[in-house]
Amino acid sequence: MPIITITRGKFSGGEEIAEDLAKQLGAKCISDELLRESAKDYKADEAVMADFFEKNPNFLDRMTSRRFEYVAFLRATLLGMCEDNNLVYHGNAGQELLRDVPHALKVRLMLSFHFRARRLMEQFDIPFEQAEEMVRQIDDDRTKRTQYYYDADWRDSSRYDLMIRMDGTKRPFIENTIKQMVEQPRFQPTEEDLEAFHKVHFLSKLQAIAAAMLGAHISMMNLTYEDHVVTLEGSFPTSDVMKLDQLLDQLRALDEVHEVVPKISAGFAFYR
């Protein structure tokens, strides 16, 4: 069964291809649902999360480093949805959220400004020049957001396994090409791949739990997981040290965690 991420420009028709492909493969197809599930699982404000991933970051966003918090929620939720290796995702930055899952096929569908602008013009009955400018602005904003949240350029071909130009290409050909690609051996997970995936997923859950507890302070932490041992390294403000205590207790209560090693400086003291 496949894991496929599809990155597509707005008004490109990529959403319909993702949905049709998922039906053919008998896979789940998700996009905006990821925001809702992430908000529910980690008690985050869905409207705030939507703003973070639909609007350009403002000065306050940059100062508080809230991006680490919400990216952690999204990554953990999406990895959880991939547990049965049966998913087509066409939402925000799938190629980055599943960067550590090598058997996930990461696809980019490209349609030129001209065709996308024409679709926008017809949908909203606006002049072509205005529609073209809107499409360029949408892509520019997306570039800024992806750079800010993931330190990556979504237009970079190295972020994908397959890139398809949609101009003049029929939908069946695009869908068949993706299906043939995902059938290649490198996208069929071995037992080792699945074991590695479970580790990546569990680490993402730990990071999301920490982000939910510590908020933007998670940006000052490095959390690792190896052989059932969780290690937290970094610094933490003394004023919020109670939250850190609560997080350590929460991590120690998890069945898969046998030990938690804090290497954290709180204020001017070394925290243990």
Image (cartoon, rainbow, N blue to C red):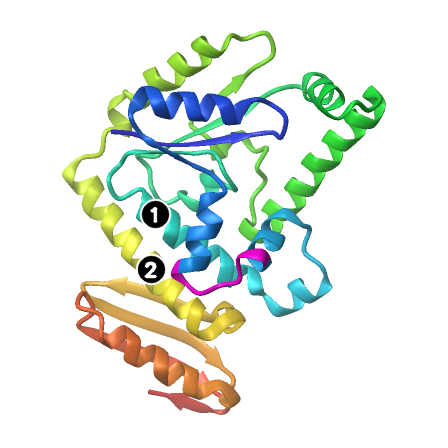
Q: Nearer the viewer, residue 248 or 264?
A: 248
Name the mark on residue 111. Answer: none
State whether residue 246 is above or below residue 186: below
Which stretch is magenta? 41-47
Q: Which residue is mark 2?
A: 205
Local secondary structure at mark 2: helix
Position of 211 with respect to 258 (left or right) is: right
| Amino acid residing under circle 2 | Lys
The quadrant of the rendering that contains the N terminus is top left
Label 2 CA crowd tier, 10 Å (few <14, some 14–19, many 20+)? some
State whether residue 167 is above or below residue 8: above
Distance, label 1 to label 2, CA atoms, is 9 Å
Residue at the limit of the structure toward the bottom, as seen here: 269
Q: Is residue 43 magenta?
A: yes
Image spot of residue 162 (x, y percent): 44, 23
- Residue, x 52% and y 89% (percent of image)? 239
Q: Which residue is mark 1?
A: 79
Q: Is residue 218 magenta?
A: no
Disc on the earlier residue, 1 or 2? 1
Q: Quadrant of residue 130?
A: top right
State whether residue 237 is above or below residue 35: below
Local secondary structure at mark 1: helix
| Amino acid residing under circle 1 | Leu
The answer to whether residue 162 of the structure is visible from this angle is: no
Position of 103 with respect to 136 (left or right) is: left
Q: Quadrant of residue 11?
A: top right
- Asked if disc 1 and disc 2 are in contact, CB closer than 8 Å, the reply is yes
Image spot of residue 37 (x, y percent): 42, 52
- Residue, x 46% and y 58% (percent of image)? 39
